[in-house]
Image: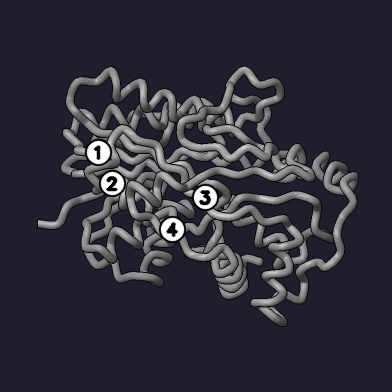
Amino acid sequence: MAETVLVTGGSGFIAGWCIVELLRRGYGVRTTVRNLAKAPAVRAAIAAEVDPGDRLTFFAAELTSPEGWDAAVAGCDYVLHVASPLGTGAVRHPDELIVPAREGALNVLRAAAAAGVKRVVLTSSVAAVGGMGTDEVRDETQWTDLSTRGLDAYRQSKTIAERAAWDFVAAEDKGMELVTVLPSVVIGPVLSPEGLGSVQVISRLVGGKIPGTPRIGFTLVDVRDVADLHLRAMTAPEAPGERFIAATEFKWFAEIAAILRARLGERAAKVPTRRLPDFVPRLMALFDPALRYVVPGLGRRNSWSSAKAKRVLGWAPRPVEDSIAECGESLVAKGAA
């Protein structure tokens, strides 16, 4: 009998590709959405990649409420807890991200432990490792310092939620295993034009939404490779109790734009060619919450090591140039750029 996996936040970018990969590998999949009215659209997006048949079931559940989680997780062998609030919009108070991230993780873990789930894989982030805007190569042994002055709400939320998850598993006595996966900026083909999250990095360039390329860069990773790492973390006997970073290369905005122009041709006609002086993104950030998050990284590199995932789990991410190009192609095809 096929094993069953709960993937939380089924309408999300990473969760969608986790569902696709699980279905391709023969698992039965359950997923949660905040409103079941979203289920047909999510199913259709998944079906464009793989026929879910009767192996995909939807449940309604909210991160901040314990309601619905027991039903969603009942009978599951594994849980991929991917759902978490994104830090790409305006946040009036850090608790708008911290509370749902922490409480969501704990609600899922409580339900999973009560249901006798074997292992939970929690999607954290390199935001919980620190190292933004430094030349230091960071790894899984390091954590974001919550006492850092000016630390944004997203980094706080990912760090607090992951620590809460580890504390919960250490305290509970039912033998449930935990693994965390920590992606960098996730790009790659989109399943839907909705909920783009970090893919906005590419969609804004392809759609000509910014007048030029700011002196900002990102360490990127393909969503399909992130999904693959979740599945490796779910089943590998070496994985329990470990954190695994999912990250590849750092690319400046200008380098991303050049790759899009080279690979997409006429479809990249709106991609800007000129570079913006630093004062322009700083000014734009006053009116654009998504830019407000990245402006502190002006002119700064960052780097996280995925050596552990490659060594322990055999993870082999694809070239970042392919991820950038295929992300741009899918955005154009789905009318999201």
- In the picture, residue 295 is in which quadrant? top right
Pointers 2 and 1 in contact (C-beta within 8 Å): yes
Q: Which residue is mark 3?
A: 247
The residue drawn where x is 35% and y is 62% is: 20
The residue drawn where x is 74% and y is 45% is: 291
Q: Is residue 132 left or right of residue 232?
A: right
The residue mark sitting in front, 1 or 4, is 4
Question: Quick check: can you spot residue 61?
Answer: no
The residue drawn where x is 57% and y is 75% is: 333
- The image shows residue 40 at horizontal and vertical percentages of 39, 61
Q: Which residue is mark 2?
A: 234
In front of the other: 178 or 113: 178
Q: Earlier in the sequence, mark 3 or mark 4?
A: 4
Q: Is residue 264 left or right of residue 159?
A: right
Pointers 3 and 4 in contact (C-beta within 8 Å): no
Type of the residue with mark 2: Met
Looking at the image, is 146 positioned above or below residue 185? above
Q: Secondary structure at mark 3?
A: loop
Looking at the image, is 94 positioned above or below residue 248? above
Q: Which residue is mark 1?
A: 119
- The image shows residue 112 at horizontal and vertical percentages of 25, 34
Q: Which residue is mark 4?
A: 225
Q: Secondary structure at mark 4?
A: helix
Q: Secondary structure at mark 1?
A: strand
In front of the other: 99 or 80: 80
- In the picture, residue 96 is in which quadrant? top right
Q: Earlier in the sequence, mark 2 or mark 3?
A: 2
